[in-house]
């Protein structure tokens, strides 16, 4: 009987801990626009523009040659396809995380941005950077101030 009580109290403690974790707090997420220094923000834009440039150059090459980059160079074609997919996926993850941690947007605005990211990423990701990431003042966390 004593073992049953110990097990029940252990579960009650973990349920209380989960409730405390689920409650909104005053601590902001570590990965949000406010925590990014201006240099990191510019680096993020450069990486994004590189991914968009890879995508558009691949589209241009597909218009010029039947097999795109593969007609110019087999290695270059495979490299450009891999770099475009990898960098594009990474940019979607980074901007999706920034959007998910953006407390300034309502739920409906957040959903609209996610749909725009999915349907028109090469246009909406830079637009999101200019509207929601760049103008936010830099507010380092206490760990960043050290």
Image (tube, grey):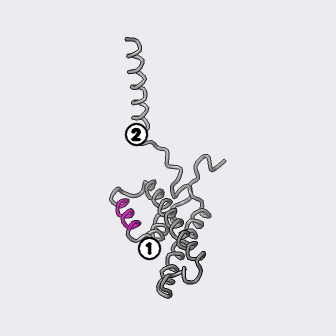
Q: Nearer the viewer, residue 115 or 83?
A: 83
Q: Is residue 95 magenta?
A: no
> Is residue 98 placed above or below 9 in the rendered structure?
below
Q: Which residue does the image show at 54% across and 69% down from the upper left?
A: 82
**Number of marks in the rendered image:** 2
User: Is residue 37 toward the left or the right of residue 128 in the image?
Assistant: right
- Dot 1: within a 10 Å radius of its alpha carbon, few (fewer than 14), some, or many (20 or more) residues? few
Q: Which residue is mark 1?
A: 123
> Is residue 6 placed above or below 50 in the rendered structure?
above
Q: CA distance from mark 1 to mark 2?
A: 36 Å
- Find residue 23 and name its label: 2
Q: Earlier in the sequence, mark 1 or mark 2?
A: 2
Q: Which residues are magenta?
A: 109-118
- Dominant SS in magenta: helix
Image coords of residue 20 (percent x, y): 42, 35
Image coords of residue 67 (percent x, y): 49, 82
């Amino acid at each position: 009987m004593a073992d049953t009580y110990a097990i029940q109290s252990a579960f009650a403690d973990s349920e209380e801990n989960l409730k405390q974790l689920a409650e909104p707090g005053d601590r902001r997420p570590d990965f949000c626009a406010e925590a990014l220094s201006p240099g990191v923000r510019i680096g993020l834009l450069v990486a994004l523009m590189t991914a968009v440039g890879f995508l558009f150059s691949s589209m241009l090459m597909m218009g010029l040659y039947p097999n795109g980059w593969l007609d110019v160079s087999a290695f270059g074609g495979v490299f450009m396809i891999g770099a475009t997919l990898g960098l594009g996926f990474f940019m979607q993850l980074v901007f999706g995380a920034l959007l998910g941690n953006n407390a300034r947007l309502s739920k409906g605005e957040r959903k609209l941005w996610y749909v725009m990211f999915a349907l028109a990423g090469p246009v909406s990701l830079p637009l999101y950077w200019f509207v929601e990431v760049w103008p936010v003042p830099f507010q380092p966390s206490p760990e960043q101030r050290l």
